[in-house]
Image: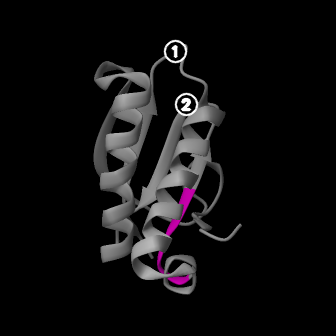
């Protein structure tokens, strides 16, 4: 079953681990609004380091909020030209791994 997601492709020179850490801050911000349990149930992401990409689930309101916060955070942290984002459909197992639950 395909899941609506956003695909963030980072330019060379951006440390993907730093971007993932920023994503985790976005999850934390969502927990402040929705609570830890709802974020854990309704949000997920996947990282594909081989192509410098992070996929973030957007199939729920919580996922959409996380994407909005993440986009703002990485724009400020790395610059607007450091990444490209677009909406895609991701199937579990596509691009190396399934979307992870927020709590993992």
- Percent across and percent down for residue 48 are 60, 41
Q: Which of 21 and 96 is in front in this view?
A: 21
Residue 63 shows in the view? yes
- The residues tagged by marks 2 and 1 sit, at their Cα atoms, a distance apart of 8 Å
Q: Residues within 10 Å of mark 2 (few under 14, many from 20)?
A: some
Q: Do the residues labelled 2 and 1 touch (CB within 8 Å)?
A: yes
Q: Which of 95 and 35 is in front in this view?
A: 35
Residue at 30% in and 75% down: 61
- Label number found at residue 39: none
Reply yes or no: does residue 89 show up in magenta.
Answer: no
Q: Name, please, the residue furthest toward the right.
A: 104
Q: Nearer the viewer, residue 87 or 26?
A: 26
Q: In this view, does 94 lie above or below 57?
A: above
Residue of label 1: 12
> In the rendered structure, which disc, 2 or 1, sits on the residue that comes first in sequence?
1
Q: Quadrant of the N terminus?
A: bottom left
Quadrant location of residue 74?
Answer: top left
Residue of label 2: 52
For numbered disc 2, what is the local secondary structure?
loop
Residue 88 shows in the view? no
- Judged left or right of residue 103, residue 76 is left
Residue at 49% in and 82% down: 35
- Write the start and end of the magenta stretch as one range: 41-45
Quadrant location of residue 52?
Answer: top right
Residue at 54% in and 83% down: 41
Q: What coloring was used for the rendering? A: one colour
């Amino acid at each position: 079953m395909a899941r609506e997601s956003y695909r963030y492709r980072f330019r060379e020179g951006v440390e993907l681990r730093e971007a993932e850490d920023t994503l985790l801050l976005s999850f934390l911000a969502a927990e402040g609004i929705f609570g830890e349990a709802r974020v854990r149930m309704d949000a997920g992401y996947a990282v594909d380091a081989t192509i410098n990409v992070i996929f973030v689930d957007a199939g729920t309101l919580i996922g959409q909020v996380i994407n909005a916060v993440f986009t703002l955070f990485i724009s400020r942290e790395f610059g607007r030209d450091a990444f490209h984002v677009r909406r895609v459909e991701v199937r579990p197992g596509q691009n190396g791994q399934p979307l992870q639950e927020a709590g993992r």
